[in-house]
Image: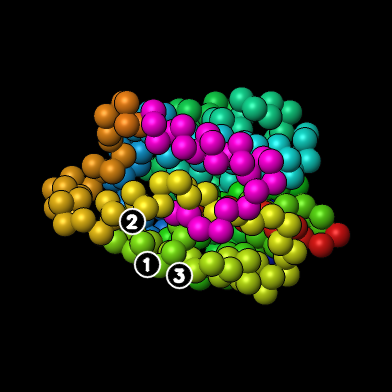
Amino acid sequence: MRLCPACAKERPDFDTPCPACGHVVPQRGGIPILAPELAGEGQGFKVESFADLYANEAQSFWFQGRNDILSWVIGRFVRPRGKFLEIGCGTGFVLSRLKRDFPDTSLTGSELFDTGLGYARQRLPGVELLQMDARALPYASEFDGIGAFDVLEHIAEDERVLSEIHRALRPGAHLVVSVPQHPALWSLADEIACHERRYTRGEMEAKMRRAGFEVVMSTSFVTILLPLMFAVRMSDRNRRALEKDPAAEHRMHPLVNKVLRATMTLELALIRLGLRLPAGGSRLVVARKPA
Ligand SMILES: [Zn+2]
């Protein structure tokens, strides 16, 4: 059910006034704005990056390869024909893939920043979009699946977000999270991306358990590229390139991009076979709210 952001009582929708307290959710371009004071300039994200993401996501081995992994894991763990919420949907690149792969799933995208939602609206006609703060989700026992893909590392209160997600899920429903891993890889790229942290091994799982979840699957990915990633992130040349052009990491020669994509395709094949990769640039965890 939906909860009123003003009085926390159940309300049928965000389009009509709250029956309990009369609160009206403002809308912009048909999108309910639940946290208007946070919708503009970013804490935790540089909103000007959305334009670069929108232009480059579809060509980038990272966003394509991550979409392959997420689509597989969501197909495996989230009930078909259910309701799925993506928190921090950005420009809607992941949701556009889920819409194609799971046409019977009812998809909702939420994002703190207006700028991202503007792009998501263009990409996702017919998909419910909401502006909201992940630290105050207006739901209880509503969703059959929730995803947060490279979002929690931007938020200081990540454990509070996990508790909010726990309440918003139905009993027995799944949470799918990806986060950057290994603090040793911390570099200017993390600072540019406004990351609060890279997660240590086991950190996300421990935080999920503290929020009431059971962890059902956990693996690293971007494992084959880990040595390359370490070398690039630590190099002075790369640092200078990023200082000049913060979006440089998302643009590369098409052939290089192809080779890097192939490594992610191979990793997904291994993960599908049941292999769990111990180290990698990212961590993927699936957790379940006990029934
Ligand atoms: Zn109310």
Badge 2: residue crowd in 10 Å (few <14, some 14–19, many ≥20): some
Circle 1 sits on which residue? 184
Is any atom of residue 163 visible in this view?
no
Helix, strand or loop status at disc 2: helix
Q: Which residues are magenta?
A: 258-281
Helix, strand or loop status at disc 1: helix
The vertical placement of 265 against 206, above or below, is above
The percent coordinates of residue 213 (x first, y second) are: 72, 65
The vertical placement of 26 against 53, above or below, is below
Is any atom of residue 238 visible in this view?
yes
Circle 3 sits on which residue? 156
| Marks 2,3: beta carbons within 8 A | no
The residue under the point 78% across, 41% down is 79
Q: Is residue 52 left or right of residue 103?
A: left
Q: Which image quadrant is residue 57 in?
A: top left
Q: Which image quadrant is residue 188 in?
A: bottom left
Q: Is residue 24 left or right of residue 167?
A: left
Q: CA distance from mark 2 to mark 3?
A: 25 Å
Circle 2 sits on which residue? 230
The residue under the point 36% across, 62% down is 185
* Type of secondary structure dominating the magenta stretch: helix
Q: Is residue 180 left or right of residue 8?
A: left
Q: CA distance from mark 2 to mark 1?
A: 8 Å
